[in-house]
Amino acid sequence: MFMSNHFAELSASIPTVVMQGYIVLMVLLVMGGTILDMMHKKSAQYFFENAKKAQKSAKRSVGAGEKVSIAATVLVNEILTSGEFNNTRRRLSHLLTMWGTIIFIVTTAIMIFGYPTPATPTPALLPQLWHIGALMLAVGGYWFWLFIRVDVSAEGLPWFRFERADLFILSLLATSTFALIWSFTGGGLTLFFALFVLSSTVLFGGVYFSKFAHMFFKPAAAFQKRVTHADGSRENLPAEYDLTDPAVHAKFPDIPEYMGKNPAYMGLGIKRESAKHY
Ligand code: HEM
């Protein structure tokens, strides 16, 4: 079961060209949904206007070489290793979900385009990776859905309550769940296959309505954030002052009046207690 390419077996009932056409259609739907989403939210326009505004309050200019090095940091830190998550559970769950999705989608495409029929035997590694990807996605996704999602972990709402904002995670979960059940029940043209196709169509066709496109926007936002730190504009936020630094005392002479001569470092307020206010 873990070794067989169920898509090649399916070629006896569904022409290969139909399966390949479906993949192309899904790619087009993701592109179309992302462009519509950008037009609707005017996110690209906001992004460039905001970047220009930040440039005006820049304290120094960031050269092309430095920008390349910032892009490399974003690739390694924010994109490949989900470094933006400042919470181990959320980061691990995101890593499982993201890498599981990538492995699952890439191996599906390779099997359907590269090994479409039993006449071209599929290397065992591909279906194995396909199952591993789907399992990683399911584990990371259910962990997020049942325990980590703000609605349940901080708002105290029941896990089964959902709204439109949950379309992305729910369609991801449905896709991986039905893909795995379809495979465990032997593949073929079954009800589980229909549910697998339906949920993946919702996942890729629902980009305009879901959080799918964050995977393209977040890297750009992370890059811009690092640029604002490098050029000193810092989105007009104050610098991170060290309250024990005499230079800071000189700059803000009323600090001792409010906080004593040697104020303790109190850390980030946001980290003082976890959000569980229900
Ligand atoms: C295959 C790729 C990816 C998948 C499947 C994925 C999946 C997810 C899921 C399920 C969530 C939770 C969404 C929710 O609140 O309902 C999420 C949130 C998030 N993702 Fe991704 N993601 C991917 C790529 C990326 C990339 C490339 C980045 C950053 C460079 C990123 C950064 C984030 C961040 C920062 C959040 C938290 C969003 C927030 O709370 O506002 N993700 N992702």
Image (cartoon, helix red, strand yellow):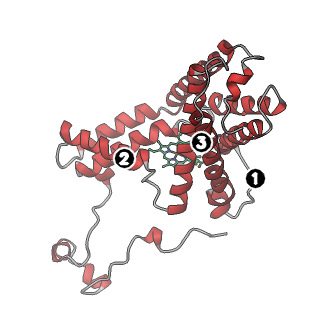
SS category of the residue bearing label 2: helix
Q: Nearer the viewer, mark 3 or mark 1?
A: 3
Check the image and name the residue furthest to the right.
191
The numbered mark, 1 or 2, whose residue comes first in the sequence reads 2
Q: CA distance from mark 1 to mark 2?
A: 35 Å
The residue depicted at 43 percent of the width and 53 percent of the height is 84
What residue sits right under mark 1 in the picture? 161
User: Which mark identifies residue 219?
Assistant: none
Q: Can I make out residue 211 in this image?
A: no
Horizontal relation, residue 26 to residue 6: left or right: left
User: Identity of the amino acid at label 2?
Assistant: Val
The numbered mark, 3 or 1, whose residue comes first in the sequence reads 3
Horizontal relation, residue 75 to residue 170: left or right: left
What residue sits right under mark 2 in the picture? 76
Q: Position of residue 248 (x, y in %)?
A: 20, 72
The residue depicted at 25 percent of the width and 43 percent of the height is 69
SS category of the residue bearing label 3: helix
What residue sits right under mark 3 in the picture? 133
Q: Position of residue 181 (x, y in %)?
A: 77, 40
Q: CA distance from mark 3 to mark 1?
A: 27 Å
The numbered mark, 3 or 2, whose residue comes first in the sequence reads 2
Q: Nearer the viewer, residue 194 or 155?
A: 194
Count residues near mark 2 (Cα–Cα under 10 Å), then give few for <14, some for 14-19, many for 20+.
few
User: Identity of the amino acid at label 3?
Assistant: Gly
